Amino acid sequence: MKYTLSILVENQAGVLSKISGLFSRRGFNIDSLAVGITGDPTVSRITIVANGDEYVEEQLEKQLNKLIPVIKVKRLIEGEFISRELSLIKVHCPAAKRFEVIKIAELMQAKVVDVAATTITLEYCETVEKAATLIDLLRPYGIREIVRTGTVAIEKGKAEIV
Amino acid sequence: MINGADIMVKCLQAEGVDTVFGYPGAAICPFYDSLYDSDIQHILVRQEQNAAHAASGYARAKMRPGVCIATSGPGATNLITGIATAYMDSIPLIAITGQVRSDLLGRDVFQEADITGACEPFTKHSYLVSKTEDLPRVFKEAFHIASTGRPGPVLIDIPIDIQQNEIEEFVYPEDVNIKGYKPNTKGHQIQVKRAVELIQKAKRPIIVSGGGVLSSGAKLKLQKFAENTQIPVLSTMMGIGVMPSDHPLYLGMLGSHGRRCANKALHTTDLAIVCGARLGDRAIAAPDQMSERTKIIHIDIDPAEIGKNVKVDIPIVGDMNNVLKKLTEEIGDYKIPEDWDVQVKDLKAHYQSKISTFDGFVEPRTLIGKLSSMLKAKAILCADVGQNQIWCANNFRIREGRFFTTGGMGTMGYSIPAAIGAKLGLKKRDVVVVCGDGSFQMSLNELSTIKQYGLNIKIIVMRNYRLGMVRELQDMHYDKRHSATILNEEPDIVALAKAYGIDSVEVSSNEDAEKYIGKIVENDQPFVLVCRVHPDTPSIL
């Protein structure tokens, strides 16, 4: 079972290591972790996408809550939040293939951010699932490098984390 | 103007600290220099780990955070085992460590260690102080965090320049506001109602009491709740002392090394009311089977403990005092079903232990039982780890006293330093250590501390020339191959104690042991009583 947690933490040194340490120590698996400051510069928001059964999810939430710098942990409900991940994908692309790759990019609404003699780099900001589709489409051309930020997520409508 | 070191001392005074345990070094020298002029008593231990254990004993005796201090690098890393022990046993501790100059952090200079990083898994929280101005807030928060909610150790790592820098004035904050730390102590009323309904429906309810009942100071409330309802009580190792051992409702310690009647009751019950206990593997070996067999109400201040080891029917998060008060009010004049009352009495009578003895040796279980009645009612027994711990847990008859041991971490060498802390916390109490010859040798250097501060601590060493508990394990599971568990060529412990200036004698019969105990409890001098114990004496009855 995949789930997304949104976590507010005090923006201070060592918080991320406390959180990542918790994962390894208690044997929790994470798919992605993204962190950045919020509107309040003393508070950061962490989005974690993790995998595990209900027991693991409950334990993870409780153990995170025990960490003193953690202000709030909220499990986001499937279908009630927007999630995005930014990917930069460098594809092997000689001039002869350029048109094809650009066509795929257009189709998927990815942005071309760099073109060189034998490569083309796309910027893609979408859900993890759509990113997977794009990567599958690009794979036959030869993917040189992928950089991903990890998922960030926000609830739909008026809902807020606090 | 006031420097950081003076501020540290003032913070401790503001928290009402009168005794600290530590070992100095270069990076903590400014603090020690300030301490020199203060009225806080500093106890110089002989190794840093024991400073943490002593602070733990002190904390348990005084029911408030114990303070231990070490220097940077090796001083700090030596503290780790003590900090980890306090963490596992939920003991409130403030560990203060010196650190190298803040502009040198991360350069691997002399005696530098990333102690906040190293202690991350073993501390409730930690601080690496970066500004002298932050010290009062950090101390205020640290004491608050250590002593509220589920108690635990908090580490404050202070670079030497932060201790030396001066600021305008010292102001100790009146309160704390930590956004992410607001322990829920109330106990949800609806959950309490549901719990009471479950208790009223149960045919064979029991109470499983853990260390949380003692650390929250709810012992008498639990006794009252049990007496009102007549629900029998078991305890975990950390919960020993929650009821007087001879209380008609008390069935003893449960678990792999517990009493058979306690375990039998646990297997028979249809509702376990778990109070401030983690239900770790030593208490409940097969948690899945337990939750299939019986309904469970779990009361704990730490929400993360509920449902961690055992599936729970009714969770109640809150301070044990509040929850027990509410439970007592809600349950009214309910009494347990009569046939269960009879069954419990039968259980207790049926599983009376028969102890076999060896001629020419002390029988430790009988001796510990006897010891209980020779001490004052409020005596504190500090048991170490190994067979001696189990002998004490099952045979010491607690009246109004306390039983200090490390049930969670199981750290050998805990008892002597913990007794030092306990004695300094409660000077009028009888404080007795029971350890083995293995655990004694892990902290015998503290005899020196006992002597230096003239502490009246009686130490009973159960000497079988074995690491008895491991050897027992080898007997049972490793084909009696006694790999590295035989302690031959041991020193003469009596001579050793005397070298430290502490009187000592070795005995090989219960009669002699009792004779000496009778004598030594009358005086105010420390004593080491070495008891020859037959290596085949088992841990459990």
Image: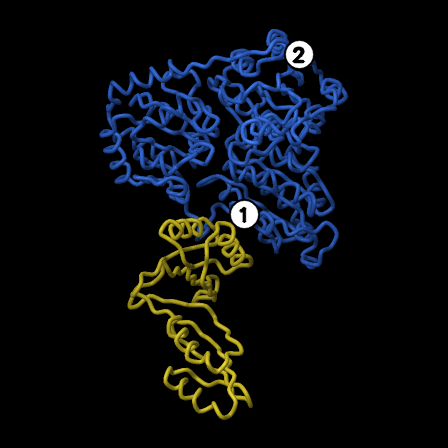
Chain colours: A yellow, B blue
Marking on residue B507: 2
Q: Chain of mark 2?
A: B
Is B325 drawn above or below residue B367 in the view shown?
Answer: below
Residue for point 51% across, 92% down: A95
Q: Quadrant of residue B53?
A: top right
Q: Say what secondary structure mark 1 lies in.
A: helix
Is B158 drawn above or below residue B331 in the view shown?
Answer: below
Q: Earlier in the sequence, mark 2 or mark 1?
A: 1
Q: How many marks?
A: 2
Horizontal side of B218 relative to B466 (left or right) equals left
The answer to whether any part of residue B122 appears in the image is yes
Is B290 drawn above or below residue A130 in the view shown?
Answer: above
Residue B176 % position (x, y): 47, 48
The answer to whether any part of residue B459 appears in the image is no
Residue B155 % position (x, y): 58, 45
Residue for point 44% across, 86% down: A101
Q: Quadrant of residue B431?
A: top right
Measured in 3D between alpha carbons, the distance from the residue under mark 2 to the one under mark 1, in whole angstroms, is 43 Å
Residue lying furthest front: B479
Q: Are marks 2 and 1 in contact (CB under 8 Å)?
A: no
Q: Badge 2, how many Cα within 10 Å: few under 14, some, many 20+?
A: many
Residue A133 % position (x, y): 39, 76
| Front residue of this view, candidates B51 and B3 | B51
- What amino acid is found at the position of numbered circle 1 in the picture? Pro
- What amino acid is found at the position of numbered circle 2 in the picture? Val
Q: Badge 1, how many Cα within 10 Å: few under 14, some, many 20+?
A: some
Q: Say what secondary structure mark 2 lies in.
A: strand
Marking on residue B121: 1
| Front residue of this view, candidates B412 and A72 | B412
Is A57 drawn above or below residue B243 in the view shown?
Answer: below
